Image (cartoon, coloured by chain):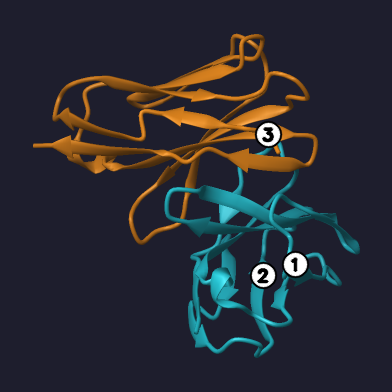
């Protein structure tokens, strides 16, 4: 089983501050790295899927980077807003399987 | 509207009583999978399917069966449910595993 680790497990951030968190994954047999946003009582929704070393993707105030050689990805949120409160999941894809990390639970304090 | 549907959304059952959770998608996706979510453990893949009649085990397949007779449907079968299968279950679909996954609304299962 691939071991995908996310840190920190939880994070409290003041509204307006920027933040980032990490996903680490085995660099062997790597196909793609996924990021999902999961709000309470809803379903996970895709943010990004990245495949190439050095990939950077951006959606509004959220961006992500990928380093496949060392096996990590960062998710950045700029100028946090209360609606950013959610659990952020990463998943590493090896061949046909996806392995998810435990998630980072982000709470934005107004 | 493009969507993944699951039924039932909530189910309380007893040990040993066979049940099926249905999953259907209307996006013509090839890849479908089932996950369970337990506190502190994240989403764990149970089974996945690359296409009709092509299924394979994920990381936690014990106690579950699946079938893919039609492209749009991917039911999850628990032949003899046990309390350790109490969990929140998600179905997901996409064109390929390296594309973004679309998740269903989830099924909360309690086995007593």
Is residue B18 shown to the viewer in this render?
yes
Q: Is residue B58 left or right of residue B11?
A: right
Where is the C terminus of chain A found, in terms of image quarters?
top left
Which of discs 3 and 2 lies nearer the camera? The answer is: 3
Tell me, yes or no, if residue A77 can be seen here: no
The tint chain A carries is orange
Relative depth, front residue between A81 and B21: B21
The reply to whether callout 2 and callout 1 are in contact (CB within 8 Å) is: yes
Q: Chain of mark 3?
A: A
> What is the spatial separation of the Cα atoms under label 2 and label 1, in whole angstroms?
5 Å
Chain (cyan): B
Nearest to the observer: residue A49 or residue A108: A108
Label 1 Cα neighbours within 10 Å, binned few <14 / some 14-19 / many ≥20: many
Left or right of residue A34, residue B33 in this image: right
**Residue in front for this viewpoint, A1 or B100:** A1
Compared across the picture, whether B60 is left or right of B52 comes to left
Badge number at residue B24: 2
Task: Tell me if mark 2 has few (under 14), some (14-19) or many (20+) residues whose alpha carbon lies within 10 angstroms of its own.
Answer: many
Name the outermost residue toward the left: A110
Residue B72 bears which disc, if any? 1
């Amino acid at each position: 089983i691939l071991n995908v680790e996310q840190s920190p497990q939880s994070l409290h951030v003041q509204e307006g501050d920027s933040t980032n968190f990490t996903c680490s994954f085995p660099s062997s047999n790597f196909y793609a790295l996924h990021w999902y946003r999961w709000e309470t009582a809803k379903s996970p929704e895709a943010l990004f899927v990245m495949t190439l070393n050095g990939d950077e993707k951006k959606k509004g105030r959220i961006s992500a980077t990928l380093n496949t050689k060392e096996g990590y990805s960062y998710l950045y949120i700029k100028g946090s807003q209360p609606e950013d409160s959610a659990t952020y999941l990463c998943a590493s894809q090896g061949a046909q399987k996806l392995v998810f990390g435990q998630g980072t639970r982000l709470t934005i304090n107004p | 509207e493009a969507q993944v549907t699951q039924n039932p959304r909530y189910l309380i059952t007893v040990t040993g009583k066979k049940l099926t959770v249905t999953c259907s998608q209307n996006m013509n996706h090839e890849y479908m999978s089932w996950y369970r979510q337990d506190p502190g453990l994240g989403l764990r893949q149970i089974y996945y399917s690359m296409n009709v009649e092509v299924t394979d085990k994920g990381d936690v397949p014990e106690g579950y069966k699946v079938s893919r007779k039609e492209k749009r449907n991917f039911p999850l079968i628990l032949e003899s449910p046990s309390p350790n299968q109490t969990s929140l279950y998600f179905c997901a679909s996409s064109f390929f595993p390296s594309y973004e996954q679309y998740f269903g609304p989830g099924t909360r299962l309690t086995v007593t």
